[in-house]
Amino acid sequence: MAQIKHNGEVVGICGDTVKVRLTVSSACSGCHAKAVCGVDESAEKIVEISGVEAAEYSVGEVVEVALQSNSMGAMAVVLTYVVPFFVLALLLVGSTVVGLSEGAAALVALGGVVVYYLVLYLVRERVKKTIKFIIIKQTK
């Protein structure tokens, strides 16, 4: 599987962290992974890449950003799409089995997804440590 890369521009440097604004290229429209990538159809995304030699980069420099490994991309997809789907489905089926009306079951299921995303938000620092981006200098 090919590594997914995006061009971006360095917009900030702080310590060993480089902030890169990802730019959507026209190649995204034909990419088969655009539905799970999250970059297509968005105006701009800022990605923080930690643990790099920030002195090697300057604000305004054009760089490439990629996931450190393809398995990290798969984990991101599982956390953002697969797990919430199963939370929704299990709570919907479980709620109807215990006798709730369809409307109440739908509210319970949606509430469960909201709680899941809230928990994911609360543990975002831990997730950041497992999903690592790399920055690649572009040669001229």
Image (spheres, rainbow, N blue to C red):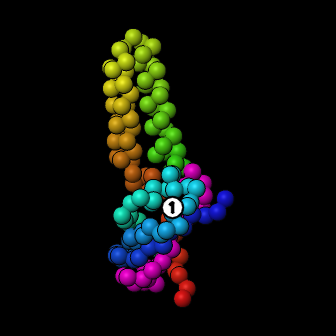
Secondary element type, mark 1? helix
In magenta segment, residue 67: yes
Residue 58 vs 100, above or below: the answer is below
Along the line of sight, which residue is nearer the eye, 90 or 54?
A: 90
Residue 94 seen in render: yes
Q: Quadrant of the C terminus?
A: bottom right
**In which image quadrant can residue 42 be found?**
bottom left
Percent across and percent down for residue 93 are 46, 21
Residue drawn at x 46%, y 46% is: 80
**Residue at position x 37%, y 65% in the image:** 44
Say which quarter of the image contains residue 17: bottom left
**Residue drawn 51% across and 56% down?**
34
Residue 51 location in percent, x, y?
Answer: 46, 70
- Tell me where residue 7 appears, x and y as whole percent: 48, 73
Identify the residue at the far bottom of this view: 140
- In the image as oriented, which residue stretches furthest toward the top? 99
For the residue carrying disc 1, how many other residues have a C-alpha within 10 Å: few (<14), some (14-19), or many (20+)?
few
User: In the picture provided, is 28 more to the left or to the right than 95?
Assistant: right
Residue 16 visible in the snapshot = no
User: What amino acid type should be assigned to the residue bearing mark 1?
Assistant: Ser
Question: Quick one: quadrant of the N terminus?
Answer: bottom right
Residue to which mark 1 is pinned = 29
The stretch in magenta equals 53-74
Picture layout, residue 5 above or below residue 96: below
Q: Position of residue 39 (x, y in %)?
A: 45, 60
Q: Locate residue 3 relative to residue 6 in the image: left or right.
A: right
Q: Quadrant of residue 139?
A: bottom right
Q: Report the label total.
A: 1
- Residue at 60%, 58% in the rendered image: 70
State yes or no: residue 20 in magenta.
no
Residue furthest right as drawn: 1
